[in-house]
Amino acid sequence: MSTTTALDTPLNIFWHAGEVTRAGREAAHGHRGATLWFTGLSGSGKSTLARAVESELFRRGARVYVLDGDNVRHGLNKDLGFGPKDRTENIRRIGEVAKLFTDFGAIAITAFISPYREDRETVRALLAPGDFVEVFVYADLDTCEARDPKGLYAKARRGEIPEFTGISAPYEPPLEPELVVNTARQDLRACTRQVIAYLEENGYLAAPSGATEA
């Protein structure tokens, strides 16, 4: 009788390493692979910032891709709901996808509420030390609710959306994120510069020659 669970790797399945190494890919790309994990309340600006950072990195020639929460639920995770167990599975799956992007030597940017610390730490544990960069995209609840770009807070207040993070479901902010970006106090350009500067200062991305502060 098998003793494996749905999340275990069966004993007859093995990881196959290719002839092209991650180091080789990173050398060809000119930057280090990493996962930038953007977390924060709905309306905090995760997706907007993720797209802005993606555009800047792409402009600089980086291999970069945004894994957005809504987009992933159109396909890979369309079978999942929004209860605690499904939220955990949603993050587990995207963590595995981000790990593959990172192994490719790309910069994967995720934009998920990912409300539970334990789930985010599970993803961190999937990756090698330094590969997971937790970016807390911070805006207070009042600011997020005032923005309400999708009208979700209004629906949640009316009881039309059960288990809505920040209203009827918890959000556990990071305790020691690599980076905190305050979108309530800084504009998009400043927030983007802050993320890019972190990547440069920590060896993920080479600073452009002759660069000056804009």
Image: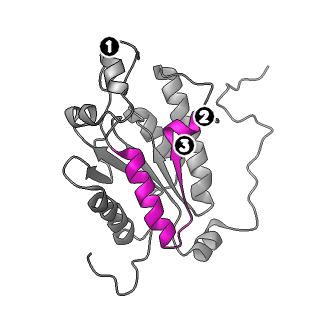
Identify the residue at horizontal 63%, vertical 25% (top origin): 79
Residue 52: say if magenta: yes
First in sequence: mark 3 vs mark 1: 3
Image spot of residue 67 (x, y percent): 53, 47
Image spot of residue 90 (x, y percent): 54, 32
Q: Is residue 18 left or right of residue 50?
A: right
Q: How is the image coloured?
A: one colour
Regarding mark 3 in the picture, which secondary structure is present there? helix
Identify the residue at horizontal 31%, vertical 41% (top origin): 44
Q: Is residue 86 left or right of residue 45?
A: right
First in sequence: mark 3 vs mark 2: 2
Q: Closer to us: mark 3 or mark 2?
A: 2
Regarding mark 2 in the picture, which secondary structure is present there? loop
Task: For the residues labelled 3 and 1, say whether their Cβ atoms are less than 8 Å apart.
Answer: no
**In terms of depth relative to the viewer, which is nearer, 124 or 73?**
73
Q: Which mark is residue 74?
A: 2
Q: Closer to us: mark 3 or mark 1?
A: 1
Query: Can you see residue 165?
Result: no
Task: For the residues labelled 1 and 2, say whether their Cβ atoms are less than 8 Å apart.
Answer: no
**In terms of depth relative to the viewer, which is nearer, 23 or 108?**
108
Image spot of residue 34 (x, y percent): 50, 59
Residue receiving disc 1: 158
Q: Which mark is residue 95?
A: 3
Compared with residue 179, is residue 123 higher up or lower down, i.e. above or below? above
Regarding mark 1 in the picture, which secondary structure is present there? loop
Specify the amino acid type for callout 2: His
Q: Quadrant of residue 1?
A: top right
Span shown in magenta: 45-73
Residue 82: say if magenta: no
Q: Residues within 10 Å of mark 3 (few under 14, many from 20)?
A: many
Specify the amino acid type for callout 1: Arg
Q: Closer to us: mark 1 or mark 2?
A: 1
